[in-house]
Image (cartoon, rainbow, N blue to C red):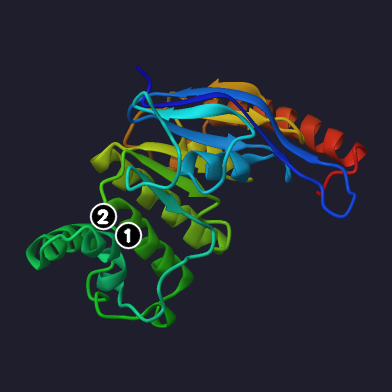
Amino acid sequence: MARLSIRDVSRVFPGVRGQPDTRALEATRLEVGDNDFITILGPSGCGKSTLLRIVAGLDFASAGEVLLDGEPVAGPGADRGMVFQSYTLFPWLTVRQNICFGLREKGASDAVQRDVSDTLIAQVGLRGFEDHYPKMLSGGMQQRTALARALANDPKVLLMDEPFGALDHQTRELMQELLLSVWEKHLKTVLFVTHDIDEAIFMANRVVVMTARPGRIKHEERVEFEHPRGYRIKTSARFAEHKARLTEEIRAETLRAAQAGAPD
């Protein structure tokens, strides 16, 4: 059984002040297996983030359902960890305190909190910054903290909504490699939304392309580079072949969105 099943999920946002309803998602189906790493591409406004929020339990489907281990998703839960583009750290808490927030809420002992946070701080490269506050950290370091916080609860599924979109190019590439190394250790099921085709290919076992709004899945591409992966695969012929196909898919949907007057 798939770890995560998205079954004919659609989302319609009611119009306000006489405006027509907005159909963000058409009936969308996706089966996600244990330890799968799926990246989601599509033009702006196609419903990528809406789909992720529905899986997270932060929004609801107008029709269809999301199942996790066979149980319907009815709201947020510790079995799903979310990482946003904005760092969403608590500014009054240190790195360690941010990472341990969920553990404290669940009543974990101080010893457990220390053990879990020490392990994650080492894995995401934040040793020496345990007692720093978010305002004292670079963007990349804040996102490392957000990733460690999401992992601290040991979620079944990690949901990532353009988590590296606000970072400079070099930091973004380093964060991609860091996330893959962490995934290889923890083997979580991951859904990762991005606009970057190179990032989508490099990170994923499977790339999913969505249509222009109303979004639905139009193309899936399996990526079979071995792990651990290094940045040099980005210059390989196989990588270029994936990129050429996905560029055509995205270009067609972006043009369709522009013709329909959707946001670019």
Q: Are marks 2 and 1 in contact (CB under 8 Å)?
A: yes
Say which mark, if any, is on residue 152: 2
Q: Residue at x 26, y 55 (%)?
A: 152
Q: Residue at x 81, y 47 (%)?
A: 15
Residue 145 x, y percent position in the rendering: 35, 64
217 shown above or below 139? above
User: Which of the 4 quarters of the picture holds residue 26?
Assistant: top right
Three-letter code, disc 2 = Ala
115 shown above or below 153? below
Say which mark, if any, is on residue 149: 1
Q: Quadrant of the N terminus?
A: top left
Q: Is residue 188 visible?
A: yes
Farthest-out residue, front: 17
Give the structural element (helix, strand or loop) at label 1.
helix
User: Which of the 4 quarters of the picture holds residue 251?
Assistant: top right
Towards the viewer: 211 or 248: 211
Residue 64 x, y percent position in the rendering: 58, 26
Residue 57 x, y percent position in the rendering: 48, 44
